[in-house]
């Protein structure tokens, strides 16, 4: 299982939100410096998200993302505000290894289809979900501010059919809480698809990474291919080297 060290960008800085709430933000300084520390520590991937662009569209923090991607041999994946094939072309042509489509994959699957056909293996989909009052998992869009009205299982079927090469699955209710990943939700995702699944949201310590690394879906024996970790790293709950070892 790979470690994907996460940096969320807002207003040019590195931040973390609590449960996707833009009003509950904690700053962590310069994102380029933070990326350098993660790279020096030995992370497998960098996971960069433009929160401003995810909410409003546009390219608010794209220059920073491109600067980070161009300055390292560590693979970089990025999401947030990627709405067009031109966006994908710019990012993949500038050193980004994998793009993550979110809102547009739900609004217009043809963009996902065309991007996946043109850049096979480099177009993933981020499926960020909240639990509803009825207990279902609803995918959120536009920087997690709106519900899509689509349940997670249905969304998985749609984006896999459209050519997604991987899924980054975020439990919004756990993101930034350090309370542990949504194991039940991840098992449901693993049982639904055979493409790589990357877990995001809730990792608070090494025990959570070990739990994810040992997670195995019962029918086909599917496992999680990667774990996104952000707050636990910047809060000093683990080092990059410790996290990588736990992922192994």
Image: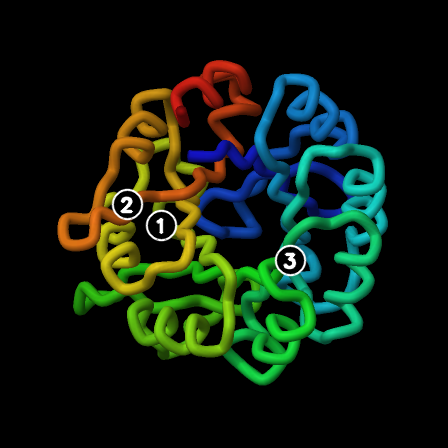
From the viewer's side, name the closer residue of 225 and 203: 225
Check contact, mark 1 vs mark 2: CB within 8 A: yes
Q: Which residue is drawn at 44% across and 18% down?
A: 245
The earlier-in-sequence mark between 1 and 3 is 3
Residue 82: give x, y in percent of width and height: 68, 66
User: Vertically, is 23 above or below 33?
Assistant: below
The residue to which callout 3 is attached is 99
Q: Give the Cα distance between marks 1 and 3.
A: 24 Å
From the viewer's side, name the closer residue of 44 and 148: 44
Residue 8: give x, y in percent of width and height: 63, 43
- Tell me the tag on residue 182: 2
Check contact, mark 1 vs mark 3: CB within 8 A: no
Q: Residue at x 45, y 73 (%)?
A: 159
Which quarter shows the N terminus?
Answer: top left
Residue 194: give x, y in percent of width and height: 34, 59
Q: Which residue is drawn at 30% across and 44% down?
A: 223
User: Vertically, is 155 above or below 108?
Assistant: above
Q: How crowded is mark 2: few (under 14 residues within 10 Å), some or many (20 or more)?
A: many
- Tell me the tag on residue 173: 1
The earlier-in-sequence mark between 1 and 2 is 1
For label 2, the SS is: loop
Q: Residues within 10 Å of mark 3 (few under 14, many from 20)?
A: many
Mark 1 vs mark 3, foreground winner is 3
Q: Which residue is drawn at 69% across and 57% down?
A: 52
Q: Give the Cα distance between marks 1 and 2.
A: 9 Å
- Tell me the tag on residue 16: none
């Amino acid at each position: 299982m790979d470690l994907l060290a996460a940096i969320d960008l807002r207003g040019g800085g590195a931040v973390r939100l609590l449960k996707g709430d833009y009003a509950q933000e904690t700053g962590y300084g310069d994102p380029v410096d933070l990326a350098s520390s993660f790279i020096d520590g030995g992370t497998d991937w960098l996971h960069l998200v433009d929160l401003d662009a995810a909410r409003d569209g546009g390219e608010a923090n794209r220059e920073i993302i491109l600067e980070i991607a161009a300055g390292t041999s560590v693979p970089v994946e990025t999401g947030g505000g990627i709405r067009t094939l031109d966006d994908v072309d710019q990012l993949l042509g500038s050193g980004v290894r994998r793009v993550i489509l979110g809102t547009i994959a739900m609004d217009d699957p043809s963009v996902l289809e065309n991007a996946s056909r043109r850049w096979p293996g480099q177009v993933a989909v981020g499926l960020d979900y909240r639990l509803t009052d009825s207990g279902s998992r609803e995918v959120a869009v536009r920087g997690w501010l709106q519900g899509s009205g689509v349940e997670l299982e249905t969304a998985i079927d749609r984006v896999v059919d459209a050519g997604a090469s991987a899924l980054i699955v975020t439990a919004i209710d756990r993101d930034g809480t350090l309370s542990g990943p949504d194991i039940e939700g991840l098992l449901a995702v693993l049982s639904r698809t055979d493409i790589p699944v990357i877990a995001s949201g809730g990792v608070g310590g090494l025990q959570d990474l070990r739990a994810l690394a040992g997670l195995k879906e019962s029918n086909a024996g599917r496992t999680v291919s990667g774990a996104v970790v952000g707050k636990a790293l910047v809060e000093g709950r683990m080092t990059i080297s410790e996290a990588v070892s736990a992922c192994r």
